[in-house]
Amino acid sequence: MSDEPEKELADARNEIDAIDARLLDLLNRRARCAQRVGEIKARRGEGDSFHRPEREAQVLRRARERNAGPLPDESVAWLFREVMSACLALERPLSVAFLGPSGTFSESAATRHFGHAARLSPQDSIDEVFREAESGRADFAVAPVENSTEGAIGRTLDLLMASPLKVCGEVVLRIHQHLMSREASLDAVVRVYSHAQSLAQCHEWLNRALPGARRVSVGSNAQAAQLAAAEPGAAALAGEAAARRYGLAILAGNVEDEPNNTTRFLVLGRREAGPSGRDKTSLIMSTPNRVGSLGELLAPFAEAGVSMTRLESRPARHTLWEYVFYVDVEGHRDDPPVARALAELSRRAPYLKVLGSYPVAVF
């Protein structure tokens, strides 16, 4: 038998070892450069601006654009995100508040955006997520804002009205719901716990697979998994991370009614994000209560050539039957077309609040 295949295998492994050694050297060189950037910022009095969302978005986009394979673009973006996260932690690990407990989709969104070196802080409610960042106990907050199947998250929209936090990023996360339990089969499940949005996202599947099971809405999917782990006959609808964290078996996977079910999360902080080259701007506005007033307010965007990607109405909390509108447009508020549209809108709108400009989600 020829020794040629063994030699080829040994040569390939030796090449991998040499590449790994070079990778390690390059990673540490990058980390030292990141430390030097932090030192320069500190000397310039910019010590609180070590995290720059626009800069990170540019790095991730460039990595994807230059990727020649065979690694998929998403894997490349994930690797670069983790490298940046680890380098940033050498200056100071970021603290990030999210809707807990551990194992929620919000935690997955926070990790996706900030990497595993960030210090994640689970909170019991969206209100507390906002308060952690507003008070300075957390550097950033991650909050769900809309789902492709069930629509807007009302509490997040309401809190954005009064919060001083700025939107400085977004995360778009594909949501796969799994039914998990301590039980060995669906036949033993008599109760299904989950967040109200997740129960709605799996409504038709539950009708078919568990028509007799009682559905119980709780504060989060991770809380649902905790309850399912503690109670005989109980199951939870949650993500795979919750099953791993609470030791549950997945009885049925990907049970969401819509296969493209996606949730969008906002990243909130106390500083504005600069232009990255591919951005969104979010704002809230009100309209006079007269015929055609909404069309008048939207006209400045069309006149400036600015594309609107989202328009969501919400009852104004201070006046009966009055509404405010949440709007997303393409571009940064510093881009001349967006700046012109906002200047004209400020003259026409009774109320206008720019929530922030931020990089479009990279992956």
Image (cartoon, rainbow, N blue to C red):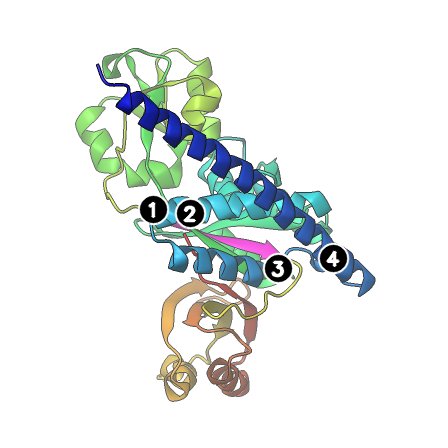
Q: Amino acid at mark 1?
A: Pro
Dot placed on the residue nearer the N-terminal end, 3 or 2 = 3
- Residue with the mark numbered 3: 52
Q: What secondary structure predominates along the stretch shown in magenta? A: strand
Which quadrant of the view contains residue 243? top left
Judging from the image, what secondary structure is the residue with disc 1 in? loop
Query: Which dot marks residue 72?
Result: 1
Please say if 216 is above or below 161.
above
Mark in the foreground, 2 or 4 = 2
Disc 2 from disc 4: Cα separation: 28 Å
Q: Residues within 10 Å of mark 2 (few under 14, many from 20)?
A: some
Q: Is residue 1 visible?
A: yes
Nearer the observer, 288 or 231: 231
Reply yes or no: does residue 145 show up in magenta: no
Q: Residue at x 51, y 47 (%)?
A: 81
Q: Mark 4 vs mark 1: which is more N-terminal?
A: 4
The residue at which mark 2 appears reads as 76
- Answer with the quarter of the image where residue 229 lies: top left
Q: Position of residue 260 (x, y in %)?
A: 26, 47
Real-space CA distance between mark 4 and mark 3, rounded to the nearest whole angstrom: 10 Å
* Labels 4 & 1 near each other (Cβ < 8 A): no
On whether residue 267 falls in the magenta region, the answer is yes
Please name whichever residue, 58 or 348, is drawn nearer the observer in this view of the structure.
58
Q: Residues within 10 Å of mark 4 (few under 14, many from 20)?
A: few
4 or 1: mark nearer the eye: 1
Which label sits on residue 218?
none
Q: Position of residue 50 (x, y in %)?
A: 69, 56
What type is the residue that disc 2 sits on? Answer: Val
Instruction: Give the residue type at disc 4.
Output: Asp
Earlier-in-chain disc, 3 versus 1: 3
Q: Which mark is residue 48?
A: 4
